[in-house]
């Protein structure tokens, strides 16, 4: 339940940049959750739960109103008319369809253009699903501006139940759909811009005074910040893979799952964190894929999101609070222990970098920039071969409209990279969801097989 969640009506600069990137089909920022249900849910009850969720997690019934001026702010505002049925589809796969057919349907669903003038989400219920654990599927796609991984987990607490017959809780009143007047928005823009302007002015003044008081010391600190930026966001020492260099517009989904306790226990035996084990398995799988295709590498650039929330109520803040961090995967190492140590050290070093929070300072200056600047920044993401995310879910099996959720596959955006790999754990099951560029990953069957084998290798290593 998300009644304590904080919803700022002002769109953050990072979220606004994500929305502006929608003009480029290669950098669309939609995420999708594909859940497998043990049986077909009650459709009327499902729509009721979507309505309930929209009143608790109000982003589901809000639209983005553009900024009045380049220095103003886009804002979240309740839609004047909202009906969850307008965001809902109920379809059936043809008899005899496979799980791959479901994945293709999900891939088409996430990649179709979105209407940015409506609330930024859509849902689909699918019948005739062929899966060892279930017979129906539910898909929810939403724009990344609504929430990051932690926010999405909170959103689903509003939508799902903890028991089959429903979770008793208050049905909240819908938020007011009264739009802000032009004058009220202009006044709010001035009010909200003052903290940013004050922060920039104060920061500039402090830097200027520091240069006057101790120029050598300040020069060293400036150089340290620049070096930190290069370490986090530069690609020096990690050239892209020639096997994954091509880019196109055709996408494909891969998905599988495995028991999480054996994987977690193996990592505990090895002295690795879950994140270290996850990234080590990815490295081993990518290494195997390249070696099988006779293209060994010394390193490979990968980006991971790092949570930059701060404060006691940090987990109750909507929107995106992440910073991308570039790592060089050690593809030339043979020993998994050395790979894990290398990756772990790089991640721990990255989260301590002074430049990690720089995006919160830079984004407000970028959001009002010309579109070609935003496009250039979005295109720079293609310099990385792989993006990976790791989101922990619930320790229990939730329910949706009376049906038990037996599997939950995560699919994140593909912003110009060859493949986006996501790990989501729920109720002792680890789920892997991959969205890939078919032009970059020509042999997707081999790609999937190599990654699966790598996770099995890590489990066996720590057994």
Image (tube, grey):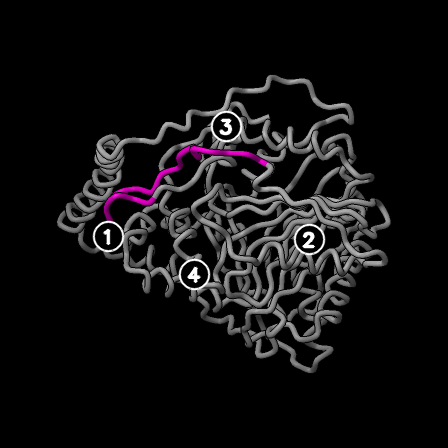
Q: Which residue is mark 1?
A: 217
Q: Are marks 2 and 4 in contact (CB under 8 Å)?
A: no
Q: Is residue 340 visible?
A: no
Mark 1 surroundings within 10 Å by alpha-carbon count, few (fewer than 14), some (14 through 19), many (20 or more): few
Give residue 326's position: percent from left, percent from top. 49, 60
C-alpha span from label 3 to label 4: 31 Å
Q: Which residue is mark 2?
A: 277
C-alpha span from label 1 to label 4: 24 Å
* SS state under label 3: loop
Q: Which residue is mark 4?
A: 233
Give residue 439's position: percent from left, percent from top. 60, 74
C-alpha span from label 2 to label 4: 23 Å
Q: Is residue 251 above or below residue 13?
A: below
Q: Which residue is mark 3?
A: 5
Of residues 130 and 379, the one drawn nearer to the viewer in this rendering: 130
Say which mark, if any, is on residue 143. none
Give the extent of the magenta segment: 66-84
* Closer to the eye: label 3 or 1: 3
Q: Which residue is painted at 38% across and 48% down in the image?
A: 16
Mark 4 surroundings within 10 Å by alpha-carbon count, few (fewer than 14), some (14 through 19), many (20 or more): some
């Amino acid at each position: 339940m998300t009644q304590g969640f904080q919803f700022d009506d002002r769109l953050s600069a990072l979220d606004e940049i994500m929305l502006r990137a929608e003009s480029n089909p290669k950098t669309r920022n939609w995420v999708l959750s594909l859940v497998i249900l043990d049986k077909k849910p009650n459709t009327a009850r499902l729509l009721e739960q979507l309505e309930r969720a929209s009143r608790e997690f109000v982003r589901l019934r809000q639209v983005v109103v553009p900024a009045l001026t380049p220095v103003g702010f886009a804002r979240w505002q309740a839609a004047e008319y909202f009906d969850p049925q307008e965001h809902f589809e109920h379809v059936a796969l043809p008899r005899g369809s496979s799980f791959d057919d479901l994945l293709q349907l999900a891939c088409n669903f996430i990649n179709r253009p979105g209407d940015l003038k409506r609330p930024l989400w859509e849902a689909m219920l699918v019948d005739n699903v062929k899966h060892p654990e279930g017979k129906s599927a539910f898909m929810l796609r939403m724009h990344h501006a609504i929430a990051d991984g932690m926010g999405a987990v909170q959103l689903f607490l509003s939508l799902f139940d903890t028991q089959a017959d429903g979770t008793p809780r208050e049905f909240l009143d819908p938020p007011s759909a009264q739009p802000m007047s032009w004058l009220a928005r202009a006044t709010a823009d001035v009010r909200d811009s003052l903290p940013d302007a004050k922060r920039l002015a104060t920061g500039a003044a402090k830097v200027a005074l520091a240069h006057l008081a101790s120029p050598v010391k300040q020069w060293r600190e400036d150089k340290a910040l620049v070096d930190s930026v290069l370490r986090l966001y530069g690609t020096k020492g990690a050239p892209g893979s020639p096997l994954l260099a091509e880019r196109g517009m055709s996408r494909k989904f891969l998905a599988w799952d495995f028991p999480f306790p054996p994987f977690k226990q193996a990592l505990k035996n090895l002295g690795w964190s879950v994140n270290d084990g996850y990234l080590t398995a990815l490295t081993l799988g990518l290494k195997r894929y390249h070696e099988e295709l006779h293209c060994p590498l010394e390193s490979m650039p990968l980006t991971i999101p790092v949570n930059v929330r701060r404060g006691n109520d940090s987990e109750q803040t909507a929107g995106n609070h992440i910073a991308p961090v570039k790592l060089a995967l050690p593809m030339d190492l043979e020993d998994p222990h050395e790979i894990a140590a290398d990756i772990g050290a790089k991640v721990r070093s990255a989260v301590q970098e002074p430049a990690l929070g720089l995006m919160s300072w830079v984004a407000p200056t970028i959001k009002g920039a010309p579109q070609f600047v935003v496009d250039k920044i979005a295109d720079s993401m293609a310099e990385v071969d792989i993006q990976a995310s790791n989101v922990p879910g619930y320790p229990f099996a939730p329910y949706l409209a009376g049906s038990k959720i037996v599997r939950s596959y995560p699919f994140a955006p593909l912003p110009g990279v060859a493949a986006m790999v996501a790990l989501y754990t729920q109720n002792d099951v680890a789920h892997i969801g991959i969205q890939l560029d078919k032009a970059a990953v020509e042999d997707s069957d081999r790609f999937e097989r190599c990654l699966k084998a790598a996770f099995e290798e890590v489990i066996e290593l720590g057994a």
